[in-house]
Amino acid sequence: MKKIHYSWIILIIAFFSIIVAGIIRSSSGVFLIPFEEEFGWDRSMISLAFAISLFLYGFSGPFMAALIESYGLKKMMIGAMSTLLLGISLTYVMQDTWQLILIWGIIIGLGSGLFLTVLSPYVANRWFEKRRGLAIGILTASTATGQLILLPVLAYIIENYSWRLAISLILVLAVMMFVIIVLFMRNTPKEAGVLPYGLEKEEEVPSEPAKRNPVVVAFSVLMEAVKVKGFWLLAGSFFICGLSTSGLIGTHFVSYCLSFGIPMVTAAALLSLMGVFDLIGTTLSGWLSDRFDNRWLLFWYYSLRGASLMLLPFALNEGSMVLLVIFSLFYGLDWIATVPPTVNISRQIFGVAKSGIVYGWIFASHQVGSAVAAFGGGVIFKFFNSYTWAFFMAGVFCVLASLIVMVIKKPQAEVSVQKEALEA
């Protein structure tokens, strides 16, 4: 029996770590109304806390990538999961909005930063020589799958028991993942006694960068990246990606459904359905990104997402569960299918050594968009008593993103890589 390459074990650990971190961060969608009802807090203030979380975990990305180079992947994963455990535990004792902002905005935001930003490209680029696109697709899919798959369970526990019991379930999952990371995670292929998957000669292994101040590294790479037009185009399109996914759907979809009389468990089940189909769509996107022009993939992903977001208000107004299921399937396939092509293009433009940090900055733009949608959605609801304009405008922005990505120059390296992949 052929032994499983340790790179795939690392991928599995990263996959489930991202799922747990995603569950923690995105559970805000089902806790928004329980927090509002129990503590009497204003919805826009609760949305602000969740927006800060989205903003911080996005902007922590490039620094997390630099810290990995200084302290190693395993130590950083242990530290990040410990931070999440602290935030979850403190949730039991919070009483004021400033505590909500500290716990769910700052602590959980920073704790989830490593897992939900640069871990996927770092593992794919450092542990895989072949099947990088597939690895990125699988790990990226786990980001949204974790955010969505357990929401019906959490919603059921909240409706029938209490939000504190739902927090307990999340806490147990985080503890289990912490133990697995401590026991089985490794920093590099060399530490595990293997070469990156698909690499045959040891001399071909990229040399480890010298340890430098992570803040200096992060900003020095940014200074180089901002001089490149492709960076701004990727960052701009990814801003819209964040605005139209986790910031809007992840934070306000359940509340939007509730405003039309759809039960919380049903709304959460629709989100979970998106998560299942995201696993399929994003994994497939990773496979496609190894074979086809990544710009055209992004064009279609953003165009189709925009169309689906414009369909949602119509489906809710009609009260059609069939249309809502169609939306969930369609939108789920496209939830974060944009990530593998974006990671590929950034690697092709900036190289393997710098692509992790560059992608961290691009993802920071994604999270600015998420934060704008999370907070803006709450403000729009406050003024119009409806989310319809928020979702419709997000659809329009997605159409704009589909045009932005086509301005990106096709890297010459991509041509030969796609030809080799198609011939394989």
Image (cartoon, grey):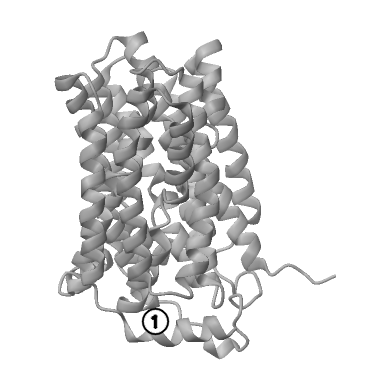
Q: Is residue 387 left or right of residue 16?
A: left
**Residue 66, how many percent across, how many down?**
35, 63
Q: Quadrant of the N terminus?
A: bottom right
Q: Residues within 10 Å of mark 1 (few under 14, many from 20)?
A: many
Residue assigned mark 1: 414
Q: Which residue is painted at 69% across and 70% down in the image?
A: 5
**Residue 15, how many percent across, how many down?**
56, 52
The quadrant where residue 402 appears: bottom left
Question: Please, is residue 290 above or below residue 329 in the view?
Answer: below
Q: Which residue is painted at 44% across and 32% down in the image?
A: 324
**Residue 87, how many percent across, how many down?**
42, 31
Q: Is residue 262 left or right of residue 395?
A: right
For label 1, the SS is: helix
Q: Which residue is painted at 42% across and 35% down in the image?
A: 26
The quadrant where residue 388 appears: top left
**Is residue 85 among the parts visible in the rendering?**
no
Query: Who is closer to the viewer here, 216 or 95?
Result: 95
Query: Who is closer to the viewer here, 231 or 77?
Result: 231
Q: Quadrant of the C terminus?
A: bottom right
Question: Please, is residue 232 above or below residue 20 in the view?
Answer: below
Q: Is residue 321 left or right of residue 308?
A: right
Residue furthest to the right:
1
Q: Which residue is painted at 32% across and 41% down in the image?
A: 309
| Residue type, mark 1 in image | Glu
**Is residue 50 among the parts visible in the rendering?**
yes
**Residue 289, how many percent across, how many down?**
45, 70
